[in-house]
Amino acid sequence: MAADRLPHEKGFHVSWDQMHRDSRALAWRLDKQGPGEDGAWKAVVAITRGGMVPACIVARELDIRIVDTISVKSYDHQTQTEAKVLKAPDAALLGDGEGVLVVDDLVDSGKTLELVRKLYPKAHFATVYAKPKGRAQVDTFITEVSQDTWIFFPWDMALQYVEPYRGR
């Protein structure tokens, strides 16, 4: 992000309603696409923390009862750092990832998904939002935004007064 530009100036604000709609759209896109009988998926793995909300919605919409998490840290506040796994899901359940949906809110640079893909090469990777640098790491997504857009997710926001664009 340019030093002379504040994050909200090229911001994409996502409300709870929009996140719910987009996560349901992701589920519908994934419906009957799994390798199981009738295109079923055997499990959903959320990349914490951002992937937890869309993963929950996808699991509900597709009636997937096995939900686990993988905790990957790749940001320190708004600064991207080297991705590392802090907590892995049940290894016996995941195996090489076949039949597993790995869900995150956003793919940015792709480093987080690249790391998780090495662990579960046969998993299907789905995000609600995608940026161009990381798009190759995602199998299914709903909305692409430009690389310099900062997405404001509803769990990071509070309602407050905002100055008009042209000032007072």
Image (tube, rainbow, N blue to C red):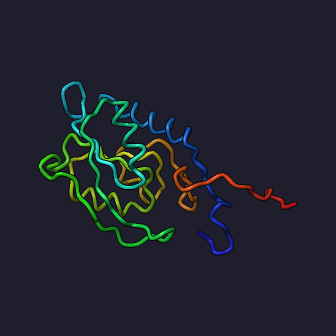
Quarter of the N terminus within the rendering: bottom right
Please give the name of the residue rendered at 43% of the width and 62% of the height, measured from the top-left corner.
109
Q: Quadrant of residue 161?
A: bottom right
Quarter of the C terminus within the rendering: bottom right
Above or below residue 2? Residue 155 is: above
Please give the name of the residue rendered at 54% of the width and 56% of the height, measured from the top-left corner.
156
How many labels were placed on the picture? Answer: 0
Q: Nearer the viewer, residue 16 or 115?
A: 16
Residue farthest to the left? Answer: 92
The image position of residue 160, as x and y in percent, is: 70, 55
The image position of residue 33, as x and y in percent, is: 29, 32
Apparent side of residue 147 relative to residue 95 in the rendered image (left or right): right
Q: Quadrant of residue 136?
A: bottom left
The image position of residue 76, as x and y in percent, is: 45, 71
The image position of residue 40, as x and y in percent, is: 24, 30
Apparent side of residue 126 relative to residue 44 in the rendered image (left or right): right
Apparent side of residue 158 relative to residue 124 in the rendered image (left or right): right
Above or below residue 140? Residue 161 is: below
Please give the name of the residue rendered at 26% of the width and 56% of the height, measured from the top-left corner.
117
Please give the name of the residue rendered at 36% of the width and 32% of the height, measured from the top-left corner.
60
Q: Nearer the viewer, residue 83 or 108?
A: 83
